[in-house]
C-alpha cells in the first residue's frame, strides 16, 4: 500500500459532497423514511447557513420509482456492475498514483484521464481503461472517476487518522492494537447519471443510457410518483436499487436568503409572529397557535385525526398480537406479520407527513417565521395489553416524527424551528399563569385530571381547551426566553433559571431563562405519555 501524503487538499466538489454526506448522517430523517412503500421521499434535509452572504439553503433527495419492461431489469444490474468495475479500476489507479489526491480543481480528473483514456493526443496511456471497458461513455467515465476519488479521499482520511492515533499511542508508550483501515474490497456504488447519460426528462418518463451487457442503449422508462419540486435546483440523478426495483434518486437544492436565527427574529423584529405547536396523542394531534410579541393569540388551528389513527393502529396491533398468540413462537431474526407491520408503519408515516405539512402551511398562511415545539420528554411505558403498550409507544414516536418532519418542511419555506422546555406548560393559565383546573366535559371544573380536554382558571375565569392553552404557553415561553427583563408583568414572580436540555434543532437557542410563578413542585403529567414537569423530572435541569 503506498504511503499517502498529507495533508490532502480537497477539490471543491469533494467538500460539497462531504457536507451532504454529513448532513445525511446527522439527520434522523433518513432512517425513519427509508421504508420503500411510498413513491416520494425526502431522504434528508440539510441545514446550513453562510454568515458572510446571509444565504441559506435546503436540500433533499426526491425518490421516484421507475417503471420499465421486465426484460430490461437486468440492464440496470449490468450498468451498475460495469460502473463499479470502472470505479474499482480508478481506485487502483489512484492508489498507484496517490499524488493525484493533492491536486486542485479538475486536476485529479484530468490526470486520471491522461493515465487511462486513449485519445489521438494521448495514444498510449499507462493504464488503459479500454482493458476494463471499451467505449465507455465519457460522462460515465467521469462519474466513475469522481466516485473513485471520493472513496480514495475517504480511505486516506481514515488512514491518516489511524496513523495519528498510532503515533499518539506510541508517544504515550501505550500498546496500539487497532487495525489499519482497509481499502474497499467490494464495490457497491449507485450509478450517478450525469447529463448526457439521461435525456428528455418529464414528470412521467425519462430516457436512460444503459449498458445491456454488450452495448449501450437508450431506454425509455416511466417515472412514478410526484414530480420534481419547482424552484429547486435539480442535480444529477442516481440509479438506486431498493429490493427488486430500481429507483431514481434526484438531489435538489434551494437557496434562499437567510431567515436569521430565532433570537435575532424574536428580539430584532417587532412584528415577528411565532407559531407554537402542542403535539398531543388525543384527537387533536397538533394544536397550533399564532402569537405576536405582545402575547396576542392571532389564530388557532386544531389538526385532528388522532382518534381514528389510534383506533386503526390499535386494531392492527391487536391482530399482530392475536396472530402471534396463535403461532406460539416467533422465529428469531425473521420478520413476522410483515403485512400488518407495514400497514402500521405506513399509517404513522403518512400521518406524520400530513400533520407536519399542515402545521407548516398554517404557519405560512399566518406569516409566522418561527415554529416552536416543546421538548418531548422521554416516554415511560404504561401497563396494559401488548396492543395498548405498542399503540402508546407508537403514538409517542409519532409526535417526535411530526416535529422532525415539520422542522425540515418549515426550513424549506424559510421558517426556523426551535424547542422550549415543557415545564409547566400544561397546567399554567396562558392568560394569568395561575394554576389551572383540568377536567372533562360534564365534570366539575376542579382538580387536575391528566389528559382531560378542558381547563378552567379560577383566578381569571379563563375556560378553554387544554391543548390550546399549552400551545399558547409554549409560544409565550419562547418570547419570555428573550424578553424576561422587558416584560416582568407577564411573569410576576421572578425566579430561578430553567435551562433547556439538549436541543435537537440546529436553529434552536442554547438555553432559556424564565421566571416561575410558583415554587417548583407542581408539575403534573397530562396523561397519554405526554407527562411533563416534576413527575418525570424533565425540566429539572
Ligand atoms: Zn387565568
Image: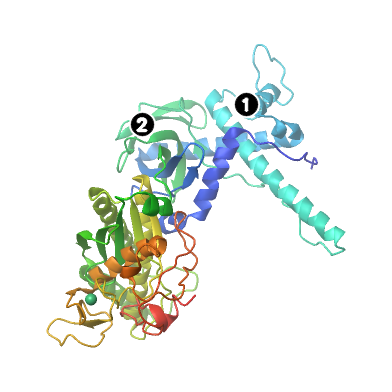
Position of residue 285 relative to residue 365, above or below, is below
Q: Could you say which is closer to the camera, residue 95 or residue 52?
A: 52
Answer with the quadrant where ligand 1 appears in the image. bottom left
Q: Nearer the viewer, mark 1 or mark 2?
A: 1
Tag 1: Cα neighbours inside 10 Å, few (<14), some, or many (≥20)? few
Q: Could you say which is closer to the camera, residue 378 or residue 114?
A: 378
Q: Secondary structure at mark 2?
A: strand
Please tell me in which quadrant of the rendered image residue 492 appears: bottom left
Q: How many numbered marks have been drawn onto this rendered protein structure?
A: 2
Colour scheme employed for the rendering of this structure: rainbow
Residue drawn at (42%, 47%) of the image: 260
Query: Relative to 109, is 291 on the left or the right?
Result: left
- Give the labeled residue for mark 1: 106
Question: Residue 142, image x and y in percent?
Answer: 57, 28
- Give the labeled residue for mark 2: 206
Quadrant in which the N terminus is drawn: top right
Residue drawn at (78%, 52%) of the image: 164
Residue drawn at (35%, 60%) of the image: 372
Question: Residue 257, image x and y in percent?
Answer: 40, 39
Q: CA distance from mark 1 to mark 2?
A: 29 Å
Q: Could you say which is closer to the camera, residue 88 or residue 417?
A: 417
Amino acid at each position: 500500500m503506498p504511503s499517502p501524503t498529507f495533508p490532502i487538499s480537497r477539490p471543491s466538489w469533494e467538500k460539497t459532497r462531504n457536507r451532504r454526506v454529513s448532513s445525511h448522517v446527522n439527520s434522523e430523517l433518513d432512517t425513519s423514511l427509508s421504508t420503500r412503500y411510498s413513491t416520494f421521499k425526502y431522504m434528508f434535509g440539510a441545514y446550513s447557513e453562510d454568515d458572510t452572504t446571509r444565504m441559506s439553503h435546503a436540500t433533499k433527495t426526491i425518490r421516484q420509482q421507475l417503471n420499465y419492461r421486465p426484460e430490461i431489469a437486468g440492464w440496470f444490474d449490468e450498468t451498475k456492475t460495469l460502473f463499479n468495475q470502472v470505479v474499482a479500476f480508478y481506485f487502483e489507479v489512484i492508489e498507484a498514483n496517490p499524488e493525484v489526491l493533492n491536486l486542485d480543481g479538475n486536476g485529479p480528473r484530468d490526470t486520471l484521464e491522461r493515465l487511462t483514456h486513449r485519445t489521438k493526443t494521448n495514444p498510449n496511456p499507462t493504464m488503459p481503461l479500454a482493458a476494463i471497458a471499451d467505449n465507455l461513455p465519457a460522462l460515465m467515465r467521469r462519474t466513475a472517476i469522481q466516485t473513485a476519488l471520493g472513496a480514495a479521499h475517504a480511505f486516506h482520511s481514515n488512514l491518516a487518522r489511524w496513523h495519528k492515533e498510532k503515533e499518539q499511542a506510541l508517544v504515550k508508550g501505550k500498546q496500539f492494537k487497532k487495525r489499519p483501515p482497509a481499502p474497499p474490497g467490494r464495490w457497491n456504488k449507485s450509478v450517478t447519471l450525469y447529463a448526457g447519460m439521461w435525456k428528455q426528462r418529464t414528470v412521467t418518463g425519462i430516457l436512460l443510457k444503459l449498458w445491456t451487457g454488450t452495448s449501450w442503449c437508450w431506454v425509455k422508462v416511466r417515472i412514478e410518483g410526484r414530480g420534481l419540486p419547482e424552484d429547486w435546483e435539480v442535480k444529477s440523478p442516481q440509479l438506486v436499487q431498493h429490493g427488486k426495483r430500481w429507483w431514481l434518486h434526484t438531489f435538489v437544492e434551494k437557496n434562499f436568503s437567510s431567515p436569521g436565527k430565532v433570537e435575532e427574529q424574536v428580539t430584532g423584529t417587532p412584528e415577528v409572529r411565532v407559531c407554537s405547536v402542542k403535539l398531543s396523542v388525543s384527537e387533536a394531534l397538533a394544536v397550533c397557535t399564532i402569537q405576536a410579541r405582545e402575547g396576542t393569540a392571532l389564530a388557532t388551528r386544531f389538526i385532528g385525526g388522532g382518534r381514528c389513527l389510534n383506533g386503526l393502529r390499535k386494531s392492527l396491533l391487536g391482530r399482530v398480537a392475536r396472530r402471534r398468540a396463535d403461532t406460539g413462537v416467533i422465529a428469531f431474526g425473521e420478520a413476522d406479520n410483515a403485512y400488518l407491520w407495514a400497514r402500521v408503519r405506513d399509517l404513522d408515516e403518512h400521518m406524520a407527513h400530513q400533520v407536519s405539512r399542515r402545521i407548516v402551511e398554517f404557519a405560512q398562511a399566518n406569516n409566522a417565521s418561527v415554529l416552536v415545539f416543546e421538548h418531548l420528554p422521554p416516554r415511560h411505558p404504561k401497563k396494559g395489553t401488548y396492543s395498548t403498550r405498542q399503540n402508546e409507544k407508537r403514538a409517542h414516536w409519532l409526535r417526535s416524527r411530526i416535529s422532525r418532519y415539520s422542522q425540515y418542511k418549515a426550513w424549506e419555506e424559510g421558517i426556523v424551528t426551535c424547542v422550549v422546555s415543557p415545564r409547566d406548560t400544561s397546567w399554567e393559565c396562558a392568560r394569568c399563569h395561575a394554576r389551572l383546573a383540568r377536567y372533562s366535559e360534564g365534570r366539575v371544573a376542579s382538580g387536575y385530571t391528566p389528559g382531560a380536554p378542558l381547563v378552567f382558571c379560577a383566578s381569571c375565569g379563563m375556560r378553554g381547551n387544554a391543548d390550546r392553552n399549552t400551545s399558547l404557553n409554549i409560544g409565550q415561553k419562547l418570547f419570555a426566553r428573550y424578553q424576561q427583563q422587558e416584560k416582568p408583568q407577564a411573569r410576576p414572580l421572578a425566579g430561578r433559571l430553567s435551562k433547556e436540555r439538549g436541543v435537537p434543532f440546529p436553529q434552536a437557542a442554547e438555553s432559556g431563562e424564565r421566571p416561575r410563578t410558583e415554587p417548583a413542585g407542581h408539575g403534573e403529567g397530562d396523561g397519554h405519555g405526554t407527562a411533563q414537569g416534576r413527575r418525570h423530572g424533565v425540566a429539572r435541569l
